[in-house]
Image: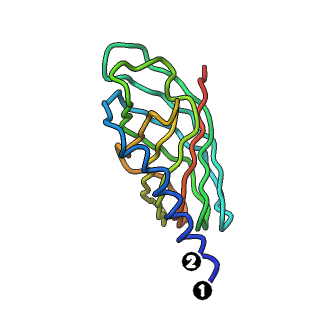
Amino acid sequence: MNRPLIALAGATLLAAGFAAPAAAQQRVRAGVLTCDVSAGIGLIVTSQRGVACQFRPDRRGRPEYYVGRIARYGLDLGITGRGVLAWTVFTAQRRYQRYQLAGNYGGASAEATLAVGLGANALVGGSRNSVALQPFSVQAQTGANLALGVAELRLRPGR
């Protein structure tokens, strides 16, 4: 068996482990998180890109700003331009606490780009693993890239 196939199988199992806590809790929709993603280069087994994000709550409240990075582990080959990711945010509590999205997230990731491409990342994490990020719209970016594996997103309060 070749190494990329083993890495992909491991990434899939790891992603399933991240999803288990999310399925065990009932979620309440809190709003939408949109992130501008910097350009990047895939280095076969890992890639890392900076993000600047805005969370818009469904209920009244001011937008929140976050900065951080998104990393992928698994198959990742190519070069991509800047992109945008958007997620619907679900929390375990009915009452959202400001900056509750700060923290680390993990989950499955898939992306394919040739000139213009699409991708999706479903992630779980945040404060006490109480936040689930479901792809709201697919990732839009330019370049040439193929990525499949596990994504990690780290967010901290910005601005």
SS state under label 2: helix
Quadrant including the N terminus: bottom right
Residue 146, disc: none
Q: Please provide percent x and percent y for residue 143.
A: 54, 60
Look at the picture and state if 60 lies above or below 18. Answer: above
CB-based contact (under 8 Å), mark 1 and mark 2:
yes
* Kind of residue indicated by mark 2: Leu
Specify whether 25 is left or right of 17.
left
Q: Please provide percent x and percent y for residue 6.
A: 59, 75
Q: Please tell me which residue lies in front, 72 or 93.
A: 93
Residue extending farthest front: 24
Q: Residue at x 41, y 39 (%)?
A: 132
* Kind of residue indicated by mark 1: Met
Q: Please provide percent x and percent y for residue 15.
A: 49, 57
**Which residue is labeled 2 in the image?**
5
Q: Residue at x 61, y 50 (%)?
A: 71
Residue 1, disc: 1
Look at the picture and state if 94 lies above or below 26. Answer: above
Q: Please provide percent x and percent y for residue 14.
A: 53, 59
Residue extending farthest bottom: 1
SS state under label 1: loop
Specify whether 8 is left or right of 42.
left
Q: Quadrant of residue 28?
A: top left
